[in-house]
Image: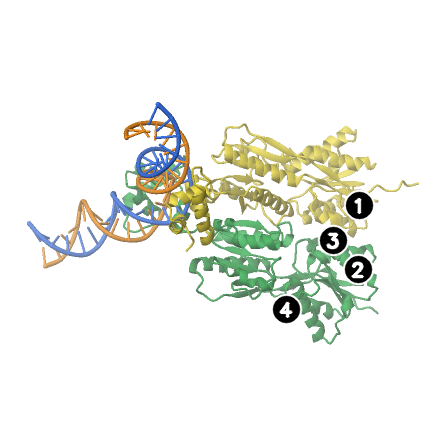
Chain colours: A yellow, B green, C blue, D orange
DNA sequence: AGACGATCGTACAACGTTGTAACACCGGTG
DNA sequence: CACCGGTGTTACAACGTTGTACGATCGTCT
């Protein structure tokens, strides 16, 4: 059906290898021949067959992106940025969803679908830091996120601790002293929750404010509903608070809703800041202050590092890259008029 | 590096074609030989090479999904469902973003990346119904969405007109009579806006309510910010209204925010219903009534139809499939206590 | 006992491409 | 005039797989 090198060659009256040489810009092809071949290529609409090229070269021209699920806004936006960055390098992206499930995450590393790509961007959730060893695979792999830090592979992540500390300090700068933290994961040391909580504690400590366990609320997955539940739990404790650091925006938006239901004024009574800078935060009422973790930069860096690995192999030492963060001030932490 | 048929054959002491026969479950292989070969396969961790298989079979085992952008929640969830449905059929998904740009959409149909997949799920935005002819391509193509209806290819879409009519009738059932419509696209006949507006008019007509142009507000892209602007425009017109049909949820959430800023009570003063059933609607305050357009079913149907096309070629007549919709009643259209 | 059928294994070609090596041809030079 | 370097083209092999055609072996039936 579609034209091959031989078809073009027949039309141009040359051998099919000459056509290949033209396509690949090899030297030692006369201008006349080149023109003749090019004309035949155009006439037949010839396109080199990708599968054959892949077989020959060992490259597919695709990279994989494994994330928990695209329905989570954070990963959707990450995927968006990754696809955009990859497109600029003429590479396509195959997306796999793991559901954050350990078994499926391992499957991504070993399954036969892996062969479809030249390398993998992997954002694990079910694996833990102890699983670092499982990442010693024989294909280019770049790790994303906060689950695993000691892996044997390149790693692109955000400045969770510093950014969380800055977010907490932003609340303290407003004069708030009772800052609740929403979304902790009991016993977690690394991982987004553990790291962001560490930043929270560091901020308190730096300002000489005692850490109060009663202000820290656990939550399951970081969905809006869990933010709402965490806020309800906090209110039930009856503990006083004048600010909230939600460990991500979804939690913050859920908490915001509950506070509004309860007649708590934001930011007058309670200031709140989230983390991630998802779009919805711009349009909530009040709009949500947050931390922009530099998502676009993460995607760009990750694609860059992965393609470099694919190009140059595993000789180079592993790299640990962090994106720059930025506090985004919106209405939920607006400075109030000084009260008489 | 990785094992090939020949490696396995050498280890098992048979010819490499015999190994192939074992892998492909061909008949006439003795149980002993089969076991011997299987042992060698396991020992070497042999996996058939996908590129070689592709070259040989002409199938890649991948399908493409072209959408405007993943950052839009609707498309992210669509992609999620498509990937999930494809995974069950052991097919991977390559996602391309067009930005809704006409040129890039055409590029998706003709570009060389196309070769990476066996077929394409295409959700156009920049193309219009007149471009149907451009869809007469020589590879399996399934159209999604509301932009093009007369194309020469399979089409999976939602019941826009009927669902919009049902949404409007839901508002009318509350006793509301001045129903505003947000998010129209001037002059559009088909396309989501045109179709949903048609449903809106049909509902009014069926109830004998005059269509009032002053209640219909144009909006650009259906983002939250545009919903907010449309509501502001409506309020500035000074026209009375007691209900709002927002042509999608994002618009509804933007409009909701503005109404709250303006002290309009929802649903007491104004009831509002959206369209799409995005997750955020569950957690807004008040939670948002909406139309569940059957997204999961769309994805499932689309993958099914595409794979069937890939399997059976273009003989079968083109199919036009619609998912079932469902009105989701939440707080924003809650029935009020009868007022004295 | 010889022939034939059933059962299993192997050699060869092809998918479309690209790298390597070898081959023709040309003008120029000794 | 023979030889050589440079230039353009061609033949061959290989990437790893699978289908087809053929070959070998064994048992069974007449």
- Label 2 SS: helix
Q: Which residue is mark 1?
A: A331
Observer-side mark, 4 or 3, equals: 3
Residue B254 disc label: none
Disc 4, disc 3: CB below 8 Å?
no
- Residue drawn at 67 percent across, 34 percent down: A159
Can you give x and y, in whole percent of width and height, for residue A40 in the image?
44, 51
Q: Which of the marked residues, 4 or 3, is nearer the chain's N terminus?
A: 4
The quadrant of the rendering that contains the N terminus of chain A is bottom left
Subunit under mark 2: B
Disc 2, disc 1: CB below 8 Å?
no
Q: Is residue B336 visible?
A: no
- Label 3 SS: helix
Q: Which of the marked residues, 3 or 2, is nearer the chain's N terminus?
A: 3
Can you give x and y, in whole percent of width and height, for residue A123 in the image?
58, 40
Q: Find the distance from the CA under tag 2 to the CA under tag 1.
A: 23 Å
Subunit under mark 1: A
Q: Which residue is mark 4?
A: B162
Compared with residue A326, is residue B262 higher up or lower down, i.e. above or below? below
Q: Which residue is mark 3?
A: B225
Q: Find the distance from the CA under tag 1 to the CA under tag 4.
A: 40 Å
Q: Which of the marked residues, 2 or 4, is nearer the chain's N terminus?
A: 4
Q: Classify mark 2: residues with Cα within 10 Å, few (<14), some (14-19) or many (20+).
A: some
Disc 1, disc 3: CB below 8 Å?
no
Q: Classify mark 1: residues with Cα within 10 Å, few (<14), some (14-19) or many (20+).
A: some
> Residue B173 sits in which quadrant?
bottom right
Residue B233 disc label: 2
Subunit under mark 3: B
Asked whether, in this view, residue B142 is left or right of residue B230, the answer is: left
């Amino acid at each position: 059906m579609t034209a091959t090198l031989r078809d073009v060659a027949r039309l141009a009256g040359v051998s099919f290898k000459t056509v290949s040489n033209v396509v690949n810009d090899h030297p030692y092809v006369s201008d006349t021949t080149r023109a003749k071949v090019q004309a035949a290529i155009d006439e037949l609409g010839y396109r080199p067959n990708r599968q054959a090229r892949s077989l020959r070269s060992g490259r597919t021209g695709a990279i994989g992106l494994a994330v928990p699920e695209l329905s989570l806004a954070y990963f959707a936006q990450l995927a968006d940025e990754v696809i955009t960055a990859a497109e600029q390098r003429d590479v396509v992206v195959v997306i796999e969803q793991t559901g954050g499930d350990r078994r499926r995450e391992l499957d991504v590393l070993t399954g036969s679908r892996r062969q479809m790509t030249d390398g993998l961007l992997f954002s694990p959730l079910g694996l833990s830091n102890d699983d670092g060893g499982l990442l010693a695979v024989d294909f280019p792999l770049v790790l994303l996120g906060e689950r695993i830090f000691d892996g044997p592979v390149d790693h692109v992540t955000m400045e969770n601790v510093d950014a969380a500390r800055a977010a907490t300090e932003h609340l303290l700068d407003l004069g708030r002293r009772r800052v609740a933290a929403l979304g902790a994961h009991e016993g977690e040391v690394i991982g987004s929750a553990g790291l962001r909580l560490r930043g929270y504690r560091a901020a308190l400590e730096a300002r000489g404010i005692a850490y109060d366990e009663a202000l820290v609320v656990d939550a399951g997955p970081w969905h809006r509903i869990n933010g709402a539940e965490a806020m309800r739990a906090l209110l039930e404790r009856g503990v006083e608070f004048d600010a909230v650091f939600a460990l991500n925006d979804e939690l913050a938006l859920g908490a915001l809703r509950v506070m509004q239901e309860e007649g708590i004024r934001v930011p007058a009574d309670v200031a709140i800041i989230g983390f991630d800078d998802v779009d919805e935060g711009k349009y909530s009422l009040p709009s949500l202050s947050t931390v922009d973790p530099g998502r676009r930069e993460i995607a760009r860096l990750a694609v860059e590092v992965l393609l470099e690995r694919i190009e140059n192999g595993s000789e180079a030492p592993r790299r640990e890259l962090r994106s720059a963060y930025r506090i985004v001030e919106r209405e939920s932490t607006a400075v109030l008029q000084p009260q008489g």
